[in-house]
Amino acid sequence: MRHARSTRRAALAWLGLLLAPAAAPAQVNGVTEAEVLFGQSAAFSGPAKELGRQMKIGIDVAFAAQNDAGGVNGRKLSLLAMDDGYEPERAKVALRELVERRKVFAIIGNVGTPTTKEVLPYVLDKGVIFFGAFTGAKLLRNDPPDRFVFNYRASYPEETAAQVKYLVEVKRIKPAQIAVFAQEDAYGDAGYEGVATMMRKYKRDPSGIVRVGYKRNTTDVAEAVKVIKANASKIRAVVMVPTYKAAARFVQKLKDEGLDLTFTSVSFVGSNELAEELMQLGPRYAEGVVVTQVVPLPTSGATAIIKYRQALQRYAPAEKPGFVSLEGYLAANLMIEGLRRAGKNLNTDTLVDALESIKGLDVGIGTPLTFGPSEHQSSHKVWGTIIDAQGVYRPLDLE
Amino acid sequence: MALNLNRPPSADDTPPRPTTAVPGPARPPVSPPGRPGSSRSLLYAGVAVGALVVIVVVAGLVRAFRSEPKPEPGPVLATPAPAAAPSSGRVAGVSDTEVVFGMSSPFSGAIKELGRGMRTGLEVAFAIANESGGVHGRKLRLTALDDGYDPERTKSVMLELLEQRKVFAIVGNVGSPTAAITIPMVMGKKVVFFGALSGAPLLRKNPPDRYVFNYRPSYAEETAAAVRYLVDVRRIDPRQIGVFYQSDAFGEAGLTGVEEQLRRYRRNPAEMVRATYQRNSADVSEAIARFRKEQGKVKAVVMVATYQAAIQFVQQAKDRGLGLLFTNVSAVGSNELAEGLTSAGAGYTSDVVVTQIVPLPTSKATAALRYQAALDKHAVGEKPGFITFEGYIVGNILIEALRRAGKDLDAEGLVAAFEDIRGLDLGVGTPITFGPKEHQGSHKVWGTQLQPDGSYKSIDLE
């Protein structure tokens, strides 16, 4: 039995619920007796397309495994993904399409900070749940958190803080010797801000940081390389806030220049793609690059990760385990837990309440997952990894 | 809840009677002269002794304390307990259908908007609770009286609330100098005093006064956060920070936080440039003259002022090109400050930071959305603002405490209920925690910066 589609905005439904608790359950977008429909807007084309593709794979296999077990409260989960090419304007169009025409119940696994920045006001205005986006930007982490925004992952400031701390305290590099290579948009700014905050903690003036960058969806790093080279005498490490193609080019050029630098990057880079790109150039480019992660090693023997690999093998046998699809998988499973708790009467408000009831959920990834009315980011854990000469990620102790 | 066993059904709908009235002919008026309230204590003794067997241990012990001076317990005990113990209605301001709270705040004069804002926020929170039947069947009411932010008037207003209006507790009072008068009164009367708009230390003794509870962080916490922001984030030398403050308990409370933080930066607070103004005045000419003398040497001023004086100070400092960065404490009245500076003309809104003790009222956080919906419904036309949001949050914490206190409500039970609140997450971004040693629910300070259009933007203080 399929409910007629409601044009009623979820935010209004929520208000309605608040003001008239006895009202009959409203028809909820994307929810029928048999199905819950989720939407995703991400890059499936262009130089960041692997990020979108991998997030989708992770969500798809988690949904598939759940659906094989009967779905959630009798409903099968499905995902409708649209390509925004990692371009903010296209993301806005895609979101409107998903919310207004396709009437999805919630958004899950969107990719990117600049794209999110563009769509967030719309999402909040519509009162649609925006869950598990692949970005650590602060705009999704307001204090207190926006009601409809939930994150699985640690933030960029948490990642870059861990990197700067590692460089200063483990590698014994002076804060003044750390430069930043960041995409010239909201993503790069978010990462840079994290480094600046750490500099202040080390009593350094952040205005002294050498910041270089490149334009989104390009690999034009010539100017960035030039500036780093010009400051070579005082730089020993570069914190990178890029995507994989630009990052690979940047590392390659600087190594070709003969500079002995430590490179670190945030998880959004697309770790597996970065390692592949660098290995194609030669092991000497790949070896020693540090990447902070917000999920454990996808090759680990931990229970949650074994289940992930089994799901991957069963539902996407052509795909190799990777950090981004693991993140999609974990985010989707967190959503499944929320749906389960929300019960049969599923709508935006019952799901928000259900998600906020998740406390110390141990899915076996090494950190408990907790939400609450004042906490919409389930994990604050950052793992360190380093690429070896075979192009394989090894665990790296960050402290 | 235990006392309900002794309550005859007939008493259930009785409105609150004056507490000096005795419910049965068997009870003589026993109040000795010069001891207001002791007759109430004696009545309490009767109720408490009658029901002690079944009373919750803590509350029972406390109640026993209340009856400590028991010169003549005889006549009270002589009353046939089960038949004539209409326990409800015996607590001032509490009937089976209603709890009445009192508020003494400025509704006239230089900071009347603060009183109005707190009252609006509280009333809206009460209205939402009352819509769904109140708390334990009791509707929440607020009796708000104007003290004009004048300590002398506060005294008579408080007397009226406590003696004539017989309110159950005091909530949402505005002001520190006025609180200096109020605190001894509520302590003497054993009346709960909650959620004042004041960050003064006199409301935050260590250990805390039994009947005094706060939602908000102290002024010292706010000004210390402001100094850290100026030094760590804005990279201003601690020696280049001055203070502008109201010359009373309010201003001095904020001054303390600045001095403490400067000491942490190993600077001597005695060398700091400081200037004051008088409460309920907007005459800042002397203060401006003081900072003009230090032009170039002082780069930022921590202000501990209310909005009219703050508006004047910022405006005149800018007119004279002093090139200062201003920080304000939350009690300034952020929205009133914004209105004043935007209407003063272009350019007056720049470099104005306000520390806040509530999140942005316009945000999409759950607590803010609920608050906005409540305003839309019960205070039509009222725009979301920091002070009304504070009143709303204070109201909701009070409601939570009333809920926990149970049907059998009195001041001691409410104290125990407050102290039972641990890690309460209302979605305001920080858990609310009280305890016997902690009577301040929140220690969280947010940063905001005034925008040219009069709105506030979140900024990181660290």
Image (cartoon, coloured by chain):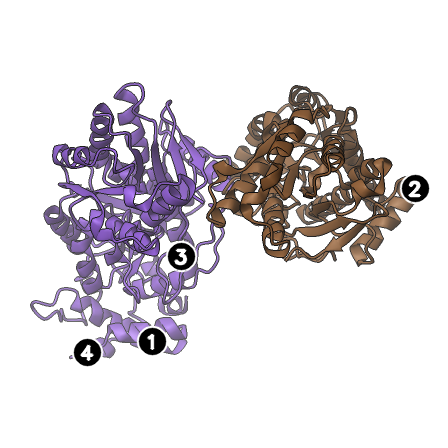
Chain colours: A brown, B purple
| Tags 4 and 1 on a common chain | yes
Q: Are marks 4 and 2 on the same chain?
A: no
Of B334 and B244, the residue lying toward us? B244
Q: Out of A394 and B52, give the one closest to the viewer.
A: A394
Residue type at the position of mark 2: Pro
Q: Secondary structure at mark 1?
A: helix
Q: Is residue A151 above or below residue B449?
A: below
The residue positioned 35% from the left and 74% from the top of the image is B60
**Element at badge 4?**
loop
Query: Is residue A292 rendered to the left or right of residue B236?
Result: right
Q: Nearer the viewer, mark 3 or mark 4?
A: 3
| Disc 1 from disc 2: Cα separation | 69 Å
Question: In percent of the image, x 17 and y 59: which residue is there?
Answer: B185
Mark seen at residue B70? 4
Label 1: chain letter: B
Q: Check disc 4 and give the amino acid type.
A: Lys
Which residue is identified by label 3? B401
Q: What is the spatial separation of the Cα atoms under label 3 and label 4, in whole angstroms? A: 30 Å
Counting other residues with Cα less than 10 Å from the Cα at mark 2, is it few (<14), some (14-19), or many (20 or more)?
A: few
* Disc marking residue A317: 2
Left or right: B8 with respect to A266? left
Crowding around mark 1 (Cα neighbors within 10 Å: few <14, some 14 to 19, many 20+) is some
Mark 3 or mark 1: whose residue is earlier in sequence: 1
In the picture, measured across the screen, residue B178 lies left or right of residue A355, that is left
Q: Which mark is residue B184?
A: none
Q: Position of residue B382 (x, y in %)?
A: 35, 29
Res. A142 in view: yes
Q: Are marks 2 and 3 on the same chain?
A: no
- Estimate the x, y position of residue A5 in percent, counting from the top left: 70, 25
The image quarter in which residue B183 lies: bottom left
Q: Which residue is mark 1?
A: B61
Give, as a three-letter code, the residue at label 1.
Leu
